[in-house]
Amino acid sequence: MYKQISANVRLTWFLMSIFVLFVIGIGYVFSILYDSTLIILIAIFIAVFQSITSYYYSDKIALLTTGAKQTKREDYLELYRIVENLCIAAGLPQPKIFIIQDLSPNAFATGRDPKNAVIVVTSGLLEKLDRTELEGVISHELSHIGNYDIRLMTVIVVLVGLIALLADWGLRIGFWSSRDNDNRDGGAWMLLIALVLWVIAPISATLIQLAVSRRREYLADATGALITRYPEGLASALDKISKNKSNLKRTNRATAHLFIADPFGADRKTNFAKEESWFSIVFSTHPPIRERIKRLKDMIK
């Protein structure tokens, strides 16, 4: 666990540094094409602002993006008791609890560290799972909190979103520059660079999300099962989640990796297929639920 925490801290700072250099690099290229130092100054400002925002406010951005609302103890008394009991077992401070009003069963954890953590569950999860299954899901999310997965996973929400914005802005700027009769050559280069960024942006975003290794989900499953001493609870919860037909209504690709199961159902569509495609295995942000259930049941033997 301590190795995982250290690795997560290092990877968080590494990714943030890469993004700073990436943004400044793009600004440098554009400043040369337009012969303007203002562009590189703007790029530096965006890079620094993005780093501060992703570290201190990425959890709030994730909550806002998913439409999660903070709960009151008296409205969700059983949920609060489950979280309190499992926090004692895991040796963690109690996180805040938020709810997403959505019939699709899902959950995620976010925050900078265990002292500033939040657990989010959907109303569908509360309706469809029994107590032991809910304990399994909550223990999984507490494992992400204890392992500091939450900081890394939440920071990536902002970083991936920034890539998408840069690609969109670059494409628009390149398009209008190419129509500028006074700067035909520069406009053509701008459009070419913008198109390249627009193509590689979604691929880069996916690869960055995959940097939040799917092994973290397996580790959180195993650690969560150790907290409850009942792997079958989480296995049963994942089985019910895998059979759900609906996807979350309010989510996007930037936040998909946060959830216990892919909110778009990518890890569920092939769950009962005999073979999974190479593409789905490589580019999925979550390991197949079928494999996760198998590993949990192997712990029982």
Image: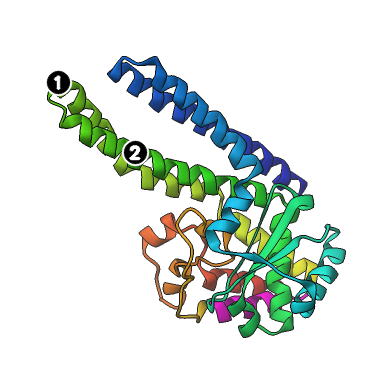
Q: Residue at x 79, y 67 (%)?
A: 227
53 sits to left or right of 26: right
Check the image and tell me how it is coloured. rainbow
Is the residue marked by circle 2 packed among few (<14), some (14-19), or many (20+) residues within 10 Å? some
Marks 2 and 1, how far apart at CA: 21 Å
Query: Magenta stretch mostly in which secondary structure?
Result: helix
Name the residue tied to disc 1.
Answer: 182
Q: Residue at x 66, y 42 (%)?
A: 56
Q: Residue at x 50, y 33 (%)?
A: 19
Instruction: Tell me the kind of residue under disc 1.
Output: Asp
Indicate the quadrant where residue 10 lies: top right
Say if residue 23 shows up in the picture.
Answer: yes
Check residue 25 in the rendering and tell me which mark sits there, or answer none.
Answer: none
Q: Quadrant of the C terminus?
A: bottom right
Indicate the quadrant where residue 131 lies: bottom right
Compared with 260, 192 (above or below) is above
Disc 2, SS: helix
- Magenta region: 229-241
Is 260 in the magenta?
Answer: no
Instruction: Tell me the kind of residue under disc 2.
Output: Trp
Name the residue tied to disc 2.
Answer: 169
Foreground of the two, 292 or 151: 151
Residue 212, horizontal then vertical, whole percent: 56, 49
Compared with 122, 115 (above or below) is above
